[in-house]
Amino acid sequence: MSYLNTVENQIEKQFYALGTLNHIKIFGTNDEESLNASIYRVLEIEQRMSAYDPNSDVSGINKCAGRAAFKIHKDTMEVLDRALEIWENSGEAFDITIRPLVELWGIGKKDNFVPCDEDIEATLRLIDSNCLLLDKVNNKASLKYVGQSIDLGGIAKGYAADEVKRILVEFGVENGLINLGGNIVVFGESSERNLFKIGIQNPLSSRGEYIGVLSVTDKTIVTSAVNERFFIKDGVQYHHILSPYTGKPSKMVILSVTAVGESSIIADAITTAIFVLGLSKGMALANKYGVELICITDNLDVLVSEGLREHFNMSIPA
Ligand code: AMP
Ligand code: MG
């Protein structure tokens, strides 16, 4: 279902896909066709990459694990290839073979469930992107062992956001704001004929308060935060980014990471990896990809990388 909002020379659609609510807004035009084509593309990407759709490429690879290679679309191959590159460059912190752990913890699905150490240990043995083999000649992918499975939840929204921008530009749209569940791409000018103002949320507030505002254009802005999906058991918060090193949710030293760069797929994977890597290694990874960062730590320190300082305005935290 999508919701449509049109004012003169400005049009917006809101729709549900990739497990989240999405908005696409364009300025200086009322070209609804460009929005429809963009939404169609996001739904197509979801169909190919969702771990919950039994007919997706991801489910095909997972079902064939340890037995056979599965034929996949070019899109999926591109995302898998990028995921493996970032896995290598992140010291294996970003690992899409994380799915058995995602299922074991069931964060966002089951309530208050902390697995025992034996189960974590056993599941951790399945997590290894060395076992994801891509056959680019025949467009097939396979996992080496039964029980292994992949999850593109940390990267697919970024790919989709890049694709929406590509399609809008192909349609001749010059100004737009794409928000796929926190994966934002802005280009051209906002409705005020200016830079886009993107609020960065306070990860400790449940009321969506901003800790500051970023003014940018022609960039992607991607935020991952511990308050996106989590549960609390015996006073401990367990969130949705899992460490392939420990098999547990990454330590709550960083509460929120925003990456600002050119490519949304890279910014998406990097923000996820930084939770696992921690601040200093995370910043090194961002540097390597030319991505700027805003990191909010557990004591609400807001670290803003050099290139963003004149674009970021702090509000006083609550
Ligand atoms: P994001 O919100 O982009 O940070 O992605 C979080 C999602 O990525 C989780 O809900 C999992 O589906 C998946 N995920 C969790 N931990 C990892 C990890 N270490 N590497 C890759 N994907 C992960
Ligand atoms: Mg991500």
Image (cartoon, rainbow, N blue to C red):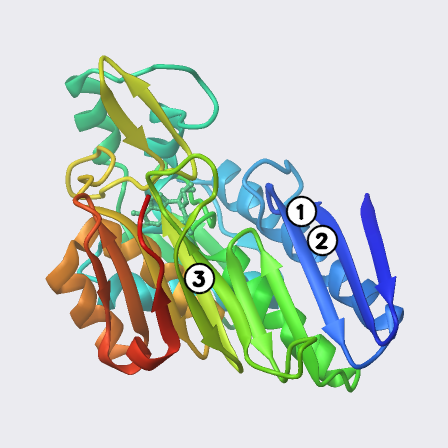
**Element at label 3:** strand
The x and y percentages for residue 195 are 55, 80
- For label 2, the crowd category at 10 Å Cα-Cα, with few meaning under 14, some 14 to 19 and many 20 or more, is some
Counting residues from the start of the chain, the first of labels 1 and 3 encountered is: 1
Quote the CA–CA distance across marks 2 and 1.
Answer: 6 Å
Is 266 drawn above or below residue 59 in the view shown? Answer: below
Residue at image coords 38%, 38%:
205
Q: Which residue is mark 1?
A: 17
Where the C terminus falls, by quadrant? top left
- Image-quadrant location for residue 231: top left
Residue at image coords 64%, 69%:
177
Disc 2 to disc 1: CB gap under 8 Å: yes
Query: At label 1, which amino acid type do we have?
Result: Ala
Q: Nearer the viewer, mark 1 or mark 3?
A: 3
Q: Nearer the viewer, mark 2 or mark 1?
A: 1
**Element at label 2:** helix
Counting residues from the start of the chain, the first of labels 3 and 2 encountered is: 2
Is 191 drawn above or below residue 43 in the view shown? Answer: below
Query: At label 3, which amino acid type do we have?
Result: Val
Q: Which residue is mark 2?
A: 43
- For label 3, the crowd category at 10 Å Cα-Cα, with few meaning under 14, some 14 to 19 and many 20 or more, is many
Residue at image coords 54%, 47%:
58
Q: Is mark 1 within 8 Å of ligand 1?
A: no
Residue 77 seen in this snapshot: no
Q: Could you tell whether 309 is left or right of 162 in the image?
A: left
Q: Is mark 3 within 8 Å of ligand 2?
A: yes
The x and y percentages for residue 269 are 38, 60
The numbered dot on residue 224 is none
